[in-house]
Image: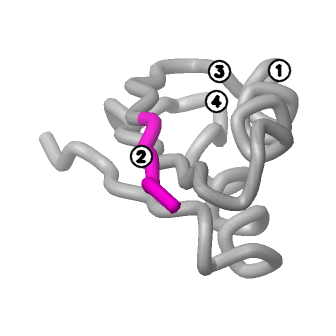
Amino acid sequence: MDTCLVIIPTYNEIENIHSIIDAVLKQGAQFSVLIVDDNSPDGTGEIVKILQQKDSKFIYYNVKEN
């Protein structure tokens, strides 16, 4: 089975990030998601970290440090 990494750049996506990640992961077990956050002031990164703790095998997170 091939694997696929979906890379999603974010900035102030707190209202959307949970549904975006869910939509990607519902595509199948071969999908993982990498969130690259531009240090969002709205807390997007905190939400991603919480989701990552629940599903660390498929959710990866990187924050751009200024």
**Cα–Cα gap, marks 3 and 2:** 19 Å
**Cα–Cα gap, marks 1 and 2:** 22 Å
* In the image: residue 55, left or right of residue 49: right
**Cα–Cα gap, marks 4 and 1:** 9 Å
Secondary structure beneath label 4: loop
**Cα–Cα gap, marks 4 and 2:** 25 Å
Judge the density around disc 1: few (<14), some (14-19), many (≥20) Cα neighbours within 10 Å: few
Nearest to viewer (mark 4 / mark 3): 3
Secondary structure beneath label 1: loop
As drawn, the label of residue 42 is: 4
The relative height of residue 61 versus residue 66 in the rendered view (above or below) is: below
Question: Which mark sits nearer the N-terminus, 4 or 1?
Answer: 1
Question: Which mark sits nearer the N-terminus, 3 or 2?
Answer: 2
Nearest to viewer (mark 4 / mark 1): 1
Q: Are marks 4 and 1 in contact (CB under 8 Å)?
A: no
Nearest to viewer (mark 3 / mark 2): 2
As drawn, the label of residue 15 is: 1
Q: Residue at x 85, y 41 (%)?
A: 26
Tag count:
4
Q: Give the residue at mark 3.
A: 13
The verdict on residue 28 being magenta is no
